Amino acid sequence: MGKGYAMAGIHKITDPQIVGENQNITVYEPARLLYSNPILAIHGMWGQGERWTKFARFFSEQGYRFIAPTLRHHYPENKIPALGKTSVNDYINDLMRLILALQERGLTTLEDGEPLAKPIIFGHSMGGLIAQKLASFGLAHKLILLNSAPPAGVKLHANLRYQLDILRYLPWLILQKPFKPNLKIFARYVMNNVPPETWDKLYRGLVYESGRAALEIRLGRIQVDFRKISCPSLVIGCEKDQITPPEVARDIGKQFRHIGYEVWTYPQFAHWIPVESGWEEAAGDIFHWLNIPAKDFEYLKNFKK
């Protein structure tokens, strides 16, 4: 692992030409920038960029610039019609424009702005599905998927109890309304591996999510052309995950058409790795994977038959 330099600070990108339709963009700056490719981390449903705080601090201390966007309409008290009608493709387009703006202008549109290199894209849950799509557009230097939502053609593998519990929210999905699971449901399926005394605080941090986006994922409507993903890719699943079981990660891995990918499963984690006890182990493992020498990825030129 790196030397663990201090983090220089946290700031928001305020230039509207860069932020675009995203709600906001938080940047965690390292005290000493050691890696030219920044990390762009995409949160999942009901979340904001702050979900990545622990990972952001860790990776910035290792020398990475860590960029954590918050998706459009994701803010406290965001129960608005526009959110309910938002598509996963809207999120994808917003982040595609962000990446292109960062590569063209850097963190500012001022003349002294320095363009950024192609990002390493992290995606958690729904953010993992968005990340897959961005990688298929050739926008990722490397790709890391944590408990990713499945693309079209990959089963959800959800257990029967989850499928029955989620049915209560089906009207919100069909009518394209903003929705948020109650505390009991969220604790059962997302916070099942964090201490109960933290549930209330974590739940208060949730925002509403798009019913349309949730339905698109549930019905497998987001297509990803894996033939167009050629960057080194790491797919992570967790044995205790009640929403996207490890079978989802394994099946996503089978979609890749190049051999420059790996699938890992952790027995000790559930769905919310970045806030669960022991998250440092996963972060450290990812850090080491990111720093595999480039020559060791030469086999990316060979494609599976």
Image: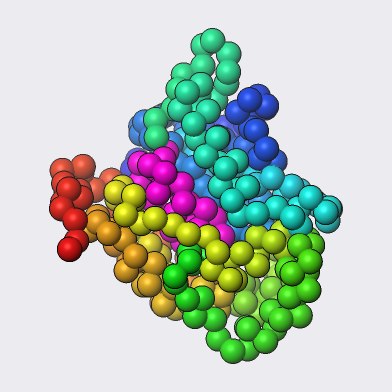
Q: Is residue 293 magenta?
A: no
Judge from the rendering whether residue 216 lies leftward or rightward of residue 230; answer left or right.
Answer: right
Q: Is residue 226 above or below residue 119?
A: below
On screen, residue 163 above or below 302: below
Vertical comparison of 246 with 295: above or below: below
In the rendered structure, which segment of residues is drawn in magenta?
119-148
Queried whether the magenta region covers residue 138, the answer comes back as: yes
Residue 32 at x, y percent in the picture: 41, 29
> Which part of the image, by quadrant, shows the C terminus?
bottom left
Q: Taking the image as drawn, is residue 270 in sight?
A: no
What residue do we see at 22% from left, 58% from top? 259
User: Residue at left 61%, top 54%?
Assistant: 88
Where residue 18 appears, as percent x and y from the top left, is 60, 28
Q: Is residue 300 visible?
A: yes
**Of residues 48 and 253, which is closer to you in this image?**
253
* Residue 295 position by quadrant: top left
Left or right side of 239 for 71: right
**Going by the image, does 88 lie left or right of 37?**
right
Query: Going 79% across and 62% down the picture, which residue do you hit?
Result: 177
Foreground residue, 85 or 68? 85
- Count the marks: 0
The residue sitting at the top extreme is 111
Residue 251 horizontal/vertical position (percent): 38, 72
Nearer the observer, 223 or 148: 223
